[in-house]
Amino acid sequence: MHAFAYKNGSLYCENVKLEDIAKAVGTPVFVYSKKTIADDLAEFRQAMAPLDTHIAYAVKACSNKAILNLMAREGLGFDIVSGGELWRVINAGGDPARCTYAGVAKTEPEIRYALQQGIYCFNCESENELREINRIAGEMGLIAPVAVRVNPHVDAHTHKYITTGTNENKFGIDISRIEEVYATIAAEMPHLRIKGLQMHIGSQLTDIKPFVMAVEKVAPIVRKFKELYQIEFWSIGGGIGIIYDGCLASGQEEWWTAHPEQITITGYAEALIPLLQPLGLKILLEPGRRLVGNAAAMLTTCVYEKKGEAKTFKMIDAGMNDIIRPALYEGYHEIWPVREHCGDTIVADIVGPICESGDFQALNRTMADVKPGEILAEMSAGAYGFSMASTYNSRPLAAEVLVDGDKWSIIRRRQTMEEMVSGECLPE
Ligand SMILES: *Cc1c(COP(=O)(O)O)cnc(C)c1O
């Protein structure tokens, strides 16, 4: 997390003191670093430069309008998974013609909307979906651009809720059937145009091997499809993992030395480019987490402390409704006080206000002995953080702030109580 560091005992994002933001807008608040996003994107682009690529940022990782606008100005395309995400992209200044649309349960209104907007490609996940898009495109007098998501049976060795490339999950079409499905499209679905092939094996991969295995496994099929159907792209999905653990603590250099297996952008590029370049196709990349994950911290205030029989708890004003990653898939986030502590540490659980035992941000964490009133920064909160937030327990959605050098702006006001219940009404 290049832009987050202590200076003179205070935690900064770029040149802004995080405590100042917390005081001005309250907590919880997500604070994004524009520089980190730009740097991570530049690194990614540079590493993949030898290929003819189209980068489609996975909107679901972080879908704030200002972040999408930033990506659009960088010239990125977008990987969307709903009609709502397409609407957001257009609303934020993105180009629908650079959108790929994934997802296993696209509805008729969503398909119509995407066809009207002229998206780049539907990435389809089942034969019935293909038939439905064919029917709707026929009715609208259009030809729908499609690719099919192939499930290559490669275990991404990530958490079971975010692995997507084995035959035990709902995504894509089995590699053993993919050729048959393409033949069926060509023979029976006149309102579809085969444009590419897609795959995505999981999220938060920290090891390069599953990526290499999947690319090696699917490349022969890609070659065949280039011949048979003149496909123009192969999407190899997203899934590149980030560092959640230890990055701020020990400093970048030491951390990398201690974790030689951790995937890097350079390592990803070096392993995959030689396999992809000979295909002579446009390669679509769909990074989500890698472009925004380390670009934000969520600030939260310690409200109470409780020393139980077996444990010490630090209660904070952010819950699983604000960041669900620890509760949903045992996600790990570093948590640091915005005012640096020296001296003793304790072991504590950092828990939220929600009435669920799963509502924790950290368990058995060795941490500074922060006191009520102190502000904490939950690091690496940029991806699948705010975008998964809800108002569960009637907690209004948090605020979001974008830092740019020594300036910062609110990119989402904290939700008011009225906004939270707007749309609700009594029966007639
Ligand atoms: C979620 C998703 C991505 C992005 O995954 P990350 O792990 O955030 O890079 C890319 N492609 C598809 C189809 C997805 O569903």
Image (tube, helix red, strand yellow):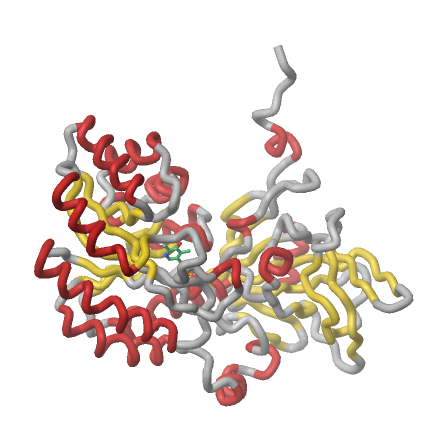
Q: Quadrant of ligand 1?
A: bottom left
Q: Position of residue 188 (x, y in %)?
A: 15, 39
Classify 39 as above or below 55: below
**How many numbered markers are drawn?**
0
- The residue at 19%/51% (across/down) is 182
On-image quarter of the C terminus = top right
Give the left or right position of residue 374, taking residue 38 as reference.
right
Q: Position of residue 30 (x, y in %)?
A: 57, 55
- The residue at 35%/60% (across/down) is 200
- The residue at 53%/88% (across/down) is 258
- The residue at 66%/62% (across/down) is 19
Q: Position of residue 424 (x, y in %)?
A: 61, 24
Give the left or right position of residue 125, taking residue 54 as reference.
right
Q: Is residue 83 visible?
A: yes
Q: Nearer the viewer, residue 128 or 147?
A: 128
Quadrant location of residue 213?
bottom left
Q: Is residue 73 visible?
A: no
Classify 15 as above or below 91: below
Quadrant location of residue 50?
bottom left
